[in-house]
Amino acid sequence: MKYLDEYRDAELVKNVLIKIRQTAKRHWTIMEICGGQTHAIMRYGIDQLLPDEIELVHGPGCPVCVTPLELIDKALAIAARPEVIFCSYGDMLRVPGSGRDLFSVKAGGGDVRVVYTPLDAVELAKNNPDKEVVFFAIGFETTAPANVMSVLQARQLGLSNYSILVSHVRVPPAMHAILSSPVNRVQGFLLAGHVCAVMGYHEYPELSDEFKVPMSVTGFEPLDIVEGILRTVQLLEAGRVEVINAYSRAVTFEGNQPAQKTIARVFEECDRKWRGIGTIPMSGWKLRSEFEAFDAEKKFDVGSIQSEESPLCMAGMILQGLARPQDCPAFGEACTPEHPLGATMVSSEGACAAYYRYGRLEAAPAEGT
Ligand code: SF4
């Protein structure tokens, strides 16, 4: 398949790996920010092919993993209401809330449906005027354009029975929080290619400069990922603080400006809680007051629900690159994809699920051993 097979060519990947070996002279800790990249790294064994000098840690880029527990509890409360058709992407259905998940609500008679786009949910609202249709609008910058379009379309159609439960997060403030931590270990970043396809990468040079950390915009195929790692290692070894684009077939500096304008028309920035990490200032989006009629949290009065994280789950440490899944005592024992204790084991993009699925079950050796 054009634009895919050539980026999975084993010989080309090997050549780049040789260059990484030749370039890396010191130990470097590099974070891939996106859960899709984490999954690809595990799937293709890229972490095992890198020289010992390069340590990959996995960032908070899995939207399901960082959706706060209380938002899931709010979703469960709304979905259980008899007048509601609750729509979500499939991977949210098994994410545990404090007591149960959306599958359990469905098994108990709730009308919970999997959709492939929020526009399907708008169509449901149009065809079911006696029902309230709610879409669970989670994700990063990547999913925001479709979610805001659904609100604009619902308004254009005059639908008063459509709303979205918003849990949108933004990548740059999360990176700022990671880099600001006194225990931060990250020295270079692979930027999420699909987020940059929407937003461009003009937001990152300031961040890179402030913390003296180089960054490479990186794609998702094996060749994209090793190329992003190589470019980052070259910058690190040369002591250069820059943001470069190693995914130029999909990303420009400015990004998709019509999409950015549409997002800004419907959403405004707000503080947002990240599961396992806590509140990060101005790290999310919420509906502007002009669109509050489409805000499910206000419509169903679930704003007061508060939830506590399980003390057993250390996903927050993993999402900040401070621990690996094998460091968690529950990993592969009390916590498996069949019986997940935390969201990073449920989501297909979660680091714990990726390590479990691709057999990284042994404890990682301590650095320097
Ligand atoms: S293995 Fe399970 S309990 Fe441990 S951090 Fe991962 S999701 Fe949480």
Image: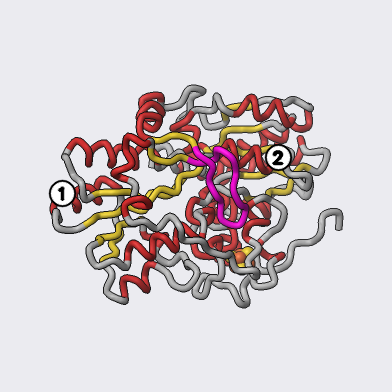
In front: 113, or 219?
113
Number of numbered discs visible in the structure rendering:
2
Secondary structure state at the residue bearing disc 2:
helix
Res 179 label: 2
Q: In the picture provided, is 229 more to the left or to the right than 295?
A: right
Residue 82, position in %: x, y? 24, 67
Taking the image as drawn, is residue 8 in sight? yes
Residue 331, position in %: x, y? 64, 70
In front: 178, or 368?
178
Of circles 1 and 2, the one toward us is 1
**Magenta part of the protein: which range?**
270-284
- Residue 272 part of the magenta-drawn span: yes
Q: Residue at x 56, y 27 (%)?
A: 203
Q: Earlier in the sequence, mark 1 or mark 2?
A: 1
Res 2 label: none
Q: Quarter of the image holding residue 318? A: bottom right
Q: Quadrant of ligand 1?
A: bottom right
Q: Main secondary structure of the magenta part?
A: strand
Residue 333, position in %: x, y? 62, 77
Identify the image quadrant of the C terminus: bottom right
- Residue 226 part of the magenta-drawn span: no
For the residues labelled 1 and 2, the Cα–Cα distance comes to 45 Å
Residue tagged by mark 1? 126
Taking the image as drawn, is residue 359 in sight? no
Q: Residue at x 79, y 61 (%)?
A: 365
Q: Are marks 1 and 2 in contact (CB under 8 Å)?
A: no
The residue type indicated by label 2 comes to: Leu
Residue 239, position in %: x, y? 79, 27
